[in-house]
Amino acid sequence: MEEKLSFEYAPAPESRALVSIKPKYGHFIGGKFVAGSKHFPTINPATEEVLSQIARGGKSDVDAAVKAASKAYTTTWSKMSGKERGKYLFRIARIMQERSREFAVLETLDNGKPIRESRDVDVPLAAAHFFYHAGWADKLEYAGLGTTPKAHGVAGQIIPWNFPLLMLAWKVAPALAAGNTVVLKPAETTSLTALLFAEVCQQAELPAGVVNIVTGDGSTGALIVNHPGIDKIAFTGSTEVGKIIARAVAPTNKSVTLELGGKAANIIFEDAAIDESVEGIVNGIFFNQGHVCCAGSRLILQESIADEVLEKLKNRMAKIRVGDPMDKNTDLGAINSKEQLLKIRELTAVGDSEGAQRWSAPCDLPGKGFWFAPTIFTGVTQAHRIAREEIFGPVLSVLTFRTPQEAIDKANNTPFGLSAGIWSEKGSKVLWASQQLRAGVIWANTFNKFDPTSPFGGYKESGWGREGGRHGLSAYLKGVSHE
Ligand code: NAI
Ligand code: MG
């Protein structure tokens, strides 16, 4: 008998038993969990299973949270030395590390992203943000941001669903290090890790009211934005909502930072290392299902190497493992929500009707849940909507160029300016291109690399201000330039 060798991966599921999810959650206000009044379900987008019921915060909840944050600011947090504040941040960071498996599993269940990413990217980076900012808490006078930098007071923070815990860390860690207290609202589809973080605050014995978490949808977010007791707003999400917030705070004294959308160019020059570039293209657009504001969603490819790169890219895409996010071998998980899936379908249908050529990796998508196969569009022109609008999914638009200047012109021809990638073996070309590109973050021969010490943020409709590093810290201090 002939024995057939199989190189299939065996299933490698992470254990769901690591987390206990309550059937219903309230808000975290003044150091305690308080009951909500109205609730909505949060589901696992990979299975459509209802995980829990999340409270929809109303006016009285937001009022209570702002009051608690304000009281904590005046009575405790603003009186405490930076050294003491730093101890709490270090403690939070260490507890996040200790509970990292729990956080990773919960994030994957609620968001749909592969466990490999929540375990190796989201959770360690979130802890790293607390460690990094813990170090700043007692050194604010030496950050070059003035001799006596002062906190704003109460920071209202609204975050999206693509990196729920990580975006919380980007917001909460610098706010606390700089001496502010916080009212945070997670996105409606992904509140569970923020609620677990509330438990971490209790475990760290963080003084009551320093961190308050009110769950809910856009209406809850708007209550935070418009609350007179809030001194600073920090938002990450769509450009559309960013504009609403900018209008709302314009006549007020509120300080504001906005991290919005992107349509990043990933430029491959003909002298680039092709195989490495293909890996970089895949990481740039298929990391986190493409739900990444700085995703390399526009591939700008030199014509002389276009055929070779596209052939290798398709071969590589055919090997992307799409499916159960809890399986440790999975590369691409579920789309976060039905709404987001419909948006991806709608924009890709526009791509078809405008004449671009669609190619999707052959893969069996699960029957339940929200799924979209890794897809590329070739023959895309600058006028196409799929070249201009953020799809926020695993969809790459491919454009080509002949001269380096044409690559730059195409890359910059966008209302956004968050990030860009350059692939070339020539250092001088990389430096030349990076100086021409209008983007806040530029990666050379790599993509989607994040570090708490590095400022992150965009030009034009990609937002205002920076997060991370000394620049990000300055946004949480009064009278300090944000750039
Ligand atoms: P969104 O901007 O509506 O949601 C982000 C956060 O803002 C959520 O917490 C939401 O509850 C809150 N929010 C919504 N309306 C608000 C308002 N009027 N005032 C205050 N807060 C409000 O994003 P959505 O609808 O989930 O996604 C739509 C598109 O936005 C995506 O397809 C994607 O293109 C883009 N997006 C970009 C993100 C980024 O990281 N740059 C993150 C999420 C979405
Ligand atoms: Mg929305």
Image: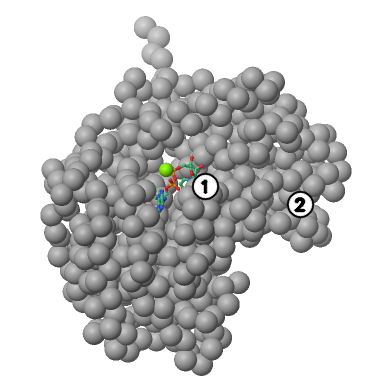
Above or below, comparing residue 203 to residue 326 in the picture: below
Quarter of the figure with residue 376? top right
Q: Mark 2 points at which residue?
A: 425
* Amino acid found under the numbered disc labelled 2: Glu
Which residue appears at 44% of the width and 63% of the height? 234
Let me know if residue 50 appears in the view. yes
Camera-nearest label, 1 or 2: 1
Report the residue that reaches farthest toward the top. Answer: 1
Left or right: 413 in relation to 90: right
Left or right: 387 in relation to 454: right
Which residue appears at 38% of the width and 41% of the height? 113
Q: Where is residue 344 in the image (x, y as percent from the top left)?
A: 50, 31
Q: Where is residue 466 in the image (x, y as percent from the top left)?
A: 55, 66
Badge 1 crowding class, 10 Å Cα cut-off, few under 14, some 14 to 19, many 20 or more, is: few
Q: Where is residue 414 in the image (x, y as percent from the top left)?
A: 69, 46
Camera-side residue of 241 and 108: 241
Which residue appears at 64% of the width and 19% of the height? 353
- Tell me the SS state at disc 1: helix
The alpha-carbon separation of the residues under discs 1 and 2 comes to 38 Å
Which residue appears at 28% of the width and 36% of the height? 44
* Mark 2 residue CB less than 8 A from any atom of ligand 1: no
Q: Where is residue 228 in the image (x, y as percent from the top left)?
A: 36, 69
Camera-side residue of 64 and 75: 64
Q: How is the image coloured?
A: one colour
* Amino acid found under the numbered disc labelled 1: Glu
Let me know if residue 467 appears in the view. no
Above or below, comparing residue 198 to residue 345 in the picture: below
* Mark 1 residue CB less than 8 A from any atom of ligand 1: yes
Q: Name the residue under label 1.
A: 240
